[in-house]
Amino acid sequence: MLFFDFEVFIKDWLVVILDMDNRKEHVIINSPSDLKQFYQEHKTDIWVGFNNHHYDDYILKGILCDMNPKEINDHIIIKEKAGWTFSNLFRSIPLLSYDVFQAKIDRGLKFFEGSLGNMVKESSIPFDIPRKLTEEELQETVKYCRHDVEQTVEVFMQRKADFDAIMSLIKMFPEVLSIRDIGLTKAQISAKILECEKVRRNDEFDLFVLPCIQIKKYRKAIDFYMSMVGKTNQKEVYSESLNMIIAGLEHNISWGGIHAGKEKYQNLGHGRQIWHVDVASFYPRLMIFHNLLTRNSKKPEKFKMIYNRRIELKHAGKKKEQAPLKIVINGTYGISKAINSLAYDPRNANLICLNGQLMLIDLIEHLEVIDGFELIQSNTDGLIVSLPDTDEAFEQMDDICFEWEKRCNMELEFDEISSIWEKDVNNYVFIFSNGKIERKGAYVKELSPLDYDLPIINKALVDRLVKGIPIEATINGCQDLKEFQMVKKISSKYDCIMHGGHWEKHKAINPATGRLKTFTRFVGNTKRLNEKCVRVFASVNESDGGLWKIKKDGSKAKVEGTPEHCFIFNDEVNGVKVPRQLNKQWYINTAYDRLSGFGICEGRR
């Protein structure tokens, strides 16, 4: 397996390749012949990069085809065109490439470097130098490029389970997949396994409600969807939504799943029983048992076979073996909604969404007859409900749910919750009766090595909610600097990041009125940073200014969520202890601000 990264300048190019099987590094600078020889020796290896499917693959193929890599670079970066559109010759170059970048969720390699606690540095050599690079400049670029390849290896290792799952699918379905498909996305792999062929249809809004759904009180939701039947304007239809009160909560009915939740809510279960009622494999069961799988699949029975096999493995406790199958099971709804997918079938995707929401509304309507029933949350494939703490209330809920399961051909899973704290439907913490903790939302989610931003705040909040540990005890007791890091990255619409200075208020005579007026002015010196991703910490030193993102027209805006006074530490932070410069009180105040979102107001200084 090879890990690689290209750097392209006006007059130069280079690539760093790490051969992980033979533990060797290869650096090729401005030598197409050396690259061609290396490629011939390694054309059957898997080439791994970060965002290489967008960029590096085409630079590699272009050089192998004796093209100017700078022209390909500008086609992709400046003209913002897909690399494959540059030349049809690219198709003649076989390449087994795998991309660790996940386009819909990733914030870039530099953000990962920051999250992992590694050095966050960018080359100081501009890519638009109109001359050949000096030997010193080339070596600095090699050093920078090597660092990025090493970081790509780290990200790959964090996500190796994804790679292993795709390799397993290739082995499971040799009739439709081969090693040449290693570079396909999970969505593309799923479409191939289901043997999809794209079909043009004009029935996107030929909608209907499944006959098993029995809604009387909340028929307004059915009427909303049925009002879309026969329409043709996608933009108009998908912008429509309906707000309605269901079981005392305002629900938003639209095309993205049902969502509603009590705000600033907490319940420690005293005198009540709280249940998480979850529909197992909701969308897959709609596809299988209500015939709503994408109609583009030539082998729909494959989906049911994969689903049944996954259930067998789940019951056998074989978690690792389930992973490949879950890619197909959980991803098929998404690809039926993706216009470029072979599985694209928007009508069936719409039917899954609307009937799924209506089934949950149906369940709520029937549960609402229980005396003392309280709906805490509705969220796409499940409910959180509260009942009086009596056997009679539970048995009534159980009977209603059993009838709903049989009627709708669904399966419900029940988990008792002992305590719950909910900011809103997207941010909550609850403890199951078996002691397991569920956390969701930016404020309280369990962070991963690739998403390690303000970890001390998440820990302080969860420890306060779940264990009753004071905010100050968690934050003041931590001496690991990495736990306090904020990793901030600006988008391409900004020119740079600047550090220093702050806005202050002052009073002066208004020349137009002659009256004393309060003005704001920016004071202090700022420094332009070479990096577009930085690791930031709150500072007790007032001489440390703020962090600003600068647009190409020179206007500035504060980088969101950063303190008025901060310092930057872009070197490796793993194992570094907290310096005196760190302003722990800022983190304490921030934690209290977030805690108040859960309806708990405590001492903020």
Image (cartoon, rainbow, N blue to C red):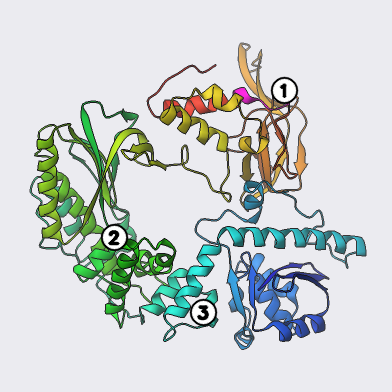
| Vertical placement of residue 395 versus 196, above or below | above
Q: What is the C-alpha distance between the residues marked 3 and 2?
A: 27 Å
- In the picture of the structure, the residue carrying the numbered disc 3 is 181
| Whether residue 218 is visible | no
| Residue 148 magenta-highlighted | no
> Which part of the image, by quadrant, shows the N terminus?
bottom right
Q: Which residues are magenta?
A: 580-585
**Horizontal side of residue 572 vs 228, given as left or right:** right
| Whether residue 322 is visible | yes
Q: Which mark is residue 281?
A: 2
- In the picture of the structure, the residue carrying the numbered disc 1 is 542
Badge 2 amino acid: Ser
Front residue of 182 and 225: 182
Residue 220: x percent and y percent?
14, 48
Front residue of 437 and 211: 437
Mark nearer the N terminus (1 vs 3) = 3
Residue at the spot 58% in from the left edge and 42% down from the top edge: 453
Residue at the spot 36% in from the left edge and 60% down from the top edge: 317
Q: Main secondary structure of the magenta part?
A: loop
Front: mark 1 or 3: 3
Q: What is the C-alpha distance between the residues marked 1 and 2?
A: 54 Å
- At label 1, counting other C-alpha atoms closer than 10 Å, the crowd grade (few under 14, some 14-19, many 20 or more) is few
Residue 507: x percent and y percent?
65, 14
